Image: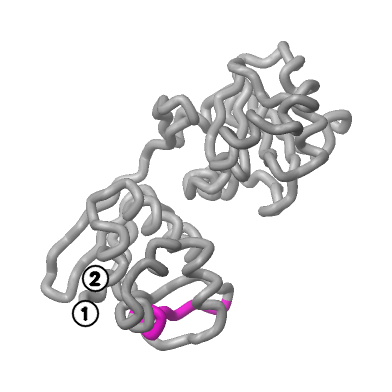
Amino acid sequence: MKLVTIILLSLMFCSFGKQQNKKEVYISSNLPKIEKLDKEDYEKFMETMSFNEYGALKYWDDALLEKAYPQGTEEYNEIIKKIVSELGYKTDNIILVSATGDEYVIDNTEIKDIKGNQYTLSEIEHANGFFTITSLACGHCLVSFKSLNELTNYDKKIAFVDKLEELEKYKTGYRNQKFGFLNDDWIIFDYNDPLLNEFLEKNNIKYKKGYFPYYFVRENNKTTKEAFKLEDL
């Protein structure tokens, strides 16, 4: 068994203990490839899982995680960043340290939009323009797409979209025919990227996770307006 310690900005912490509740649900929702391991490995992984009081995963068997998601892959890095983010830590400098002292570093200073373009957190913070947090599974969001596309008096338009993995399916369905989607004027990011949480917390944006849609305006590195409704901006 290979267990790891996470170092975040030179802060080392170890998590121990066992907690049985919600393990299968967590694996199914966040680590689906673990379910493809053989029964013995799956059960061993379950045994090592432990959560904090807020339901964030704090302890696991990394050797078994690597069987499903090999270390060094984008998938592995994203999983670790998500775990760290849910624990309430920044993800811009993660170091995994094995029991034998081997180190694995994950730098997370960039976020990719749906076109593959890379942006640093600083670039997003310094962007002057209109921001939305929206979803492909929210009726209020869908009916707003046309109005959002008609906004023209902003230097940049940036969207964080939930259920973005369903976009290709969405584009071939009735919802797209009726409501459309954000056009090419928008810089579109995945709502689930850990950097979004850091951006919101660092800039004291009052968004409550899981509520869609949400809108805010940034000017000169400050958030000047925030609202759940376009007409309230």
Give the residue number, with chain letter if any, for mark 2. Answer: 63
Is 214 in front, or is 163? 163
Going 48% across and 65% down the picture, which residue do you hit?
A: 87
Q: Nearer the viewer, residue 143 or 225?
A: 143
User: Please, what secondary structure does the residue beneath circle 1 have?
Assistant: loop
Dot 1 crowding, Cα within 10 Å, few <14, some 14–19, many 20+? few
Whether residue 15 is visible, yes or no, is no
Residue 48 sits inside the magenta stretch: yes
Do the residues under discs 2 and 1 have CB atoms within 8 angstroms? yes
In percent of width and height, residue 74 lies at 32, 46
Residue 165, labelled with which disc? Answer: none
Neighbor class of circle 2 (other Cα within 10 Å; few <14, some 14-19, many 20+) is some
Whether residue 44 sits left or right of residue 72 in the image: it is right
Question: Residue 137, relative to residue 51: is it above or below?
Answer: above
Examine the image and state in which quarter residue 116 appears.
top left
Label 1, on which residue?
A: 1
The total of numbered circles placed on residues is 2
Q: Name the quadrant containing residue 223.
A: top right
* Circle 2: residue type: Ala
Left/right placement of residue 78 relative to residue 107 reads right
Q: Amino acid at mark 1?
A: Met
Q: Is residue 59 above or below residue 123?
A: below
* Magenta segment boundaries in residue numbering: 45-53
Label 2 sits on a secondary structure element that is helix
In the visual, does 80 lie left or right of 165?
left
